[in-house]
Each structure stands twice: as C-alpha cells, then as structure tokens.
Image (cartoon, coloured by chain):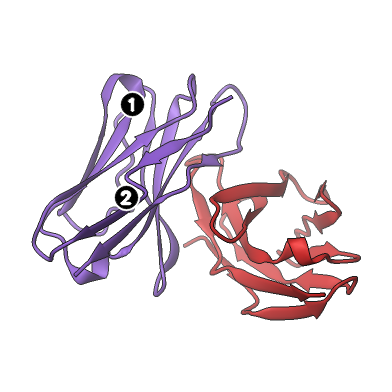
Chain colours: A red, B purple
Amino acid sequence: GDSVTQMEGPVTLSEEAFLTINCTYTATGYPSLFWYVQYPGEGLQLLLKATKADDKGSNKGFEATYRKETTSFHLEKGSVQVSDSAVYFCALMMDSSYKLIFGSGTRLLVRP
Amino acid sequence: GAGVSQSPSNKVTEKGKDVELRCDPISGHTALYWYRQSLGQGLEFLIYFQGNSAPDKSGLPSDRFSAERTGGSVSTLTIQRTQQEDSAVYLCASRDTGGAETQYFGPGTRLLVL
C-alpha cells in the first residue's frame, strides 16, 4: 500500500544551521505531497505542499521539491531559528481518497 | 475565522468505559476526517466523511470505534469499551472540497485510558 518514510529524529541543530529532513514515498499513482508541522502544544499546521512532479512548495523559508524519479520530497531550510523547533510530518494524499498518509514525524530541536 | 475545534481537550477514562469525542469543523467545509496520533503507530487515518456520501471507515481499528456526522457539520467519534491501547491523541480535520486539498486540523483530544 501507499506509505511515507521519513528520517528518524530527533534532529538537533544550532541556530542558523542548514536543515534537511528526508522524506520518501511509495504510491501506486501520482500523489500530492505535504509537509505538516506541529509546534509544542499546538495542532498540526500545513507548512507547504506540491501537487505534481517538479513542483516546489515553499513557506516560511522552508522548501521541498516533488521528485518523481527518486520518489522524494525532502524538506530544507537554509538557516533555522529556535522558533522552528517542532515535529515535522511528511504526508501524501491520493486524489481518489483525499485521506492523508503520514510519515512517523521528525522532531527538530534548534539550540540558540 | 474560527478553525476546527475539538472537545474535550483531555479525557481520562477507565478501561471498559465508553467515550465520545466531538469535532466542530470549519463552517462550510464538507469533508471531515478523524486521525489518531499514538506513540506506537504515529499518525493514522480513521474515518472520512464527504457530504452525504457513505463514510470511508477503512481506518477504524475495530468495531468498538464508530463515528457519525450530523447535519453535515459536527462529528462525534465514539469508542466503546475502551482499552489501554486506545490511549492517543485523536485529531479531527476538515477540508473545503471546492477544489482545495488542504486539510485543517483541530488541536486534538488527548485520551488516556487507565
């Protein structure tokens, strides 16, 4: 079945470091891809999305490019801030069902 | 505008009791989803309502779980005869089906079964 695999955390970085969180997917068709973020004590929020191959989603300095050839949607940010500390979830959605299939989540901790 | 709201925010119950969790979606959103976030299983889809169509119940883990959506708005997730493995955060999300894919999540209900 369809699935999402993302790197295990926690990921600990110093402020202003470069961030990459890897995400790969398995799907029978061509899903839409999402990154959701969960800040401490808050609900899940959409961070960015991409709906077709080679699309780049971006928001708040984060970027991810939909790579069909490698079935990947890695999340990147050039310079992280302490306020980016959160759990990040990669997810896919097939058009037929519109339900999200999530990865296991990656906790990011940014130290001052 | 108001987002998705859920109640209660926390629920502690004894094994064997029934619990009801409520979700108020964003006004006008016709699609509603329930997910469960637990330590062992991550974030799992439970059930999906779309308008007046029959719900997609494919993610419900057992027949102790059921959900309904009255009047196309508020939804209630019911867990009968709760077990300790039901302890999790239950998340509700809604989506505007007018061409949009984004699901908006509520803050969740944290359920602890003792």
Residue under numbered circle 1: B53
Residue under numbered circle 2: B58
Distance between the alpha carbons at the discs numbered 2 and 1: 14 Å
The secondary structure type at the circle numbered 2 is loop
Q: Quarter of the image for the C terminus of chain B: give it.
A: bottom left
**What residue appears at the point 26 percent right and 59 percent down from the top-left corner?**
B61
Q: Which class describes the residues within 10 Å of circle 2: few (<14), some (14-19), or many (20+)?
A: few
Q: Position of residue B38 (x, y in %)?
A: 39, 67
| Lateral position of residue B41 relative to residue B58, left or right | right
Q: Is residue A74 visible?
A: no
Q: Quarter of the image for the N terminus of chain B: give it.
A: top right
The secondary structure type at the circle numbered 1 is loop
Compared to A89, does B71 lie above or below?
above
| Lateral position of residue B107 relative to residue B62, left or right | right
Q: Position of residue A88 (x, y in %)?
A: 64, 63
Compared to A86, does A60 lie above or below?
above
